[in-house]
Image (cartoon, grey):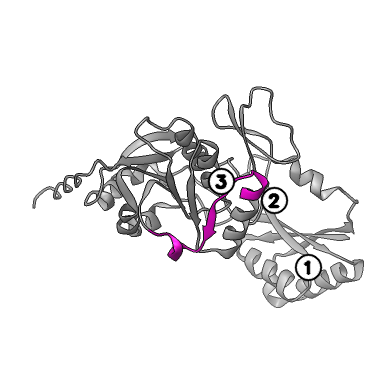
Amino acid sequence: MFELVLRSPQELVDPVSDALMDELDALSVSVEDADAGTEDERALFGEPGMPAPAPGWQRSTIQALFDSEAGAEGAASVLLSQPWARGLSLQSLSPLQAQDWVRLTQQQFAPVAITPTFWVVPSWHEPPAQARQVLRLDPGLAFGTGTHPTTRMCLRWLAQAPASAQLTRVLDYGCGSGILAIGAALMGARELDAVDIDPAAVQATQDNAQRNGVVLQAQLPEHASGVYNVVLANILAMPLKLLAPLLAGHLADGGWLVLAGILERQADELKAAYAPFVRLEVADTEEGWILMTAHKDGRAAAPAAPPPGR
């Protein structure tokens, strides 16, 4: 395997990357800040709730892998000869030292503590000595490995759920890897439906449930039916707002709605969207993200207050 490394100005990153993958048969393409580790390093992503400082780095390093030296040399020759590629330069072209890519990938994922006794543990790790409940989950194509604050907060809520939360029938809407449904099962849930619009997520949920010895139904969203004692949805604020009537409609009297994927600044938007159905409150916060919950006590929530001046 051979590695081609190019230096590119910001405006050429996308066309060069597309050409490498779509036309020049690169096996993979990655992009890094060429000024990383120097005084010129620039943040590409802002803090939660803040806009990105810039659409891209001023200078980027593009690394492309090829299965042959001829392929790498040909790609470099084609790109550097293009009239639109002014400012693109060749940094190196060299054979790639053989590495154990599986082991390198695995090293990025370590056990994650949800509570002192509840841990998410990849299959290649031994559970920590203090772990009393272990959720086995390997990284895959679907979102949800327990490393993101939103996932941790949902699992923490399940592990420390209020006494009124009966985990008899649970819906995990937008299940991703199935981590929340599996977590609910480990906490005693008896009937579990996990749904997602992505068939790959449905398959990942089925695989992970089997790995953990959990029985659940993983299907597309239209298969969610009836009402549930707990409805979990770790998605993003905009789809959560649009789904307010549907998710609230699946909530049984006395049930709990648990929502994540929400930034702190979006709390009022979510409260307003769900006000006709339930009263949402912030239940947890971590790294700029919040967990919002509501308890449906059989009474309609109070209507949202009208905007000032009306």
Please provide percent x and percent y for residue 29: 73, 61
The numbered disc on residue 34 is 2
The numbered disc on residue 248 is none
Q: Nearer the viewer, residue 264 or 205?
A: 205
The numbered disc on residue 179 is 3
Q: Nearer the viewer, residue 161 or 98?
A: 161
Q: Are marks 1 and 2 in contact (CB under 8 Å)?
A: no
Q: Which residue is mark 1?
A: 26
Dot 1: element: loop
Dot 2: element: loop
Residue at x-position 43% and y-position 59%: 224
* Lower position in the chain sequence, tag 3 or tag 1: 1
Please provide percent x and percent y for residue 84: 67, 75
Q: What's under tag 3, amino acid-wise?
A: Ile
Where are the magenta residues, as a range? 209-225
How far apart, in angstroms, are the residues tagged by discs 3 and 2? 36 Å
Q: What's under tag 1, amino acid-wise?
A: Ala
Residue at x-position 65% and y-position 53%: 207
Q: Nearer the viewer, residue 76 or 144?
A: 144
How crowded pointer 3 is (Cα within 10 Å; few <14, some 14-19, many 20+) is rated as many
Q: Are marks 3 and 2 in contact (CB under 8 Å)?
A: no
How far apart, in angstroms, are the residues tagged by discs 1 and 2? 20 Å
Dot 3: element: helix
